[in-house]
Amino acid sequence: MRETTCAGCADPFDGQPAYLVQGARWMGRRRWCGDTLLICAACHDSRRGYFNADHKTTPITWTALVGRGEQQAPVPCVACGQAVIRNAEPLLKRVTCSAACSTSLTRSRNGNKGSGQPCETCGEEITTGRADSRYCGPACRQKAYRQRKSHA
Ligand SMILES: [Zn+2]
Ligand SMILES: [Zn+2]
Ligand SMILES: [Zn+2]
């Protein structure tokens, strides 16, 4: 799942740079859930959702760009290529636009080579996926799941 629409107004970014901000989403039941949000230039410039948002009009609230340093020029997300504007960060090595993208990156960095262990279903060596994969692929994972269910 990739966020290519604005968290504030749900407009697609259409290749335009998006702003990565510290914020929260309205989860319903009087609950805001802290998150980093990707919003469009219009939402950022109009400060829509800024600080004290009314969840009835804007489902997000945000306070500032992510990062501590100066505002950066747009940098493409290393996972999906969406141009992202955020503040510089001394520890920043790579820019991702969303939690989904940094997760997919972590996964691919972990080799996407699998665990090298035999698949628990078919015994083939696991050569793709995460380093802690227990199955060689979705088919075997499904099969194991169904077996567990039928034995339960
Ligand atoms: Zn927007
Ligand atoms: Zn991305
Ligand atoms: Zn297998």
Image (spheres, rainbow, N blue to C red):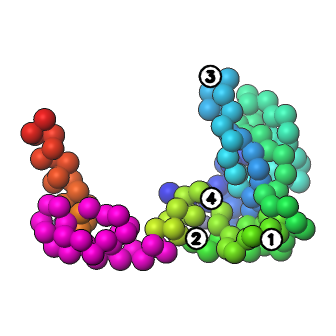
Residue 150: say if magenta: no
Q: Amino acid at mark 1?
A: Pro
* Residue at the (31%, 71%) spot, across then down: 115
Residue marked by disc 1: 90
Mark 2 surroundings: few (<14), some (14-19) or many (≥20) residues within 10 A: some
Q: Tell me if 122 is positioned left or right of 82 in this view.
A: left
Q: Are marks 4 and 2 in contact (CB under 8 Å)?
A: no
Would you say the beta carbon of the disc 4 residue lies within 8 angstroms of ligand 2?
A: yes
Q: Amino acid at mark 2?
A: Cys
Residue marked by disc 2: 80
x, y percent for residue 40: 76, 56
Residue marked by disc 4: 98
Q: Which mark is residue 29?
A: 3
Which comes before the other along the chain, label 3 or label 1?
3
Quadrant of residue 32 in the image? top right
Q: Tell me if 104 is positioned left or right of 126 in this view.
A: right
As helix, strand or loop, the secondary structure at mark 2 comes to loop
Which comes before the other along the chain, label 2 or label 3?
3
x, y percent for residue 47: 87, 47
Tell me how far mark 2 sits from mark 3, CA to CA: 33 Å
Tell me how far mark 3 sits from mark 1, CA to CA: 37 Å
In the rendered image, the vertical position of residue 15 relative to residue 9, given as above or below: below
Q: Are marks 4 and 3 in contact (CB under 8 Å)?
A: no
Tell me how far mark 4 sits from mark 3, CA to CA: 24 Å
Residue 124: say if magenta: yes
As helix, strand or loop, the secondary structure at mark 4 comes to loop
* Residue at the (79%, 44%) spot, across then down: 62
Mark 4 surroundings: few (<14), some (14-19) or many (≥20) residues within 10 A: many
Magenta span covers which residues? Answer: 108-134
- Which of the two residues, 44 or 66, is positioned nearer the viewer here? 66
Q: Amino acid at mark 4?
A: Ser
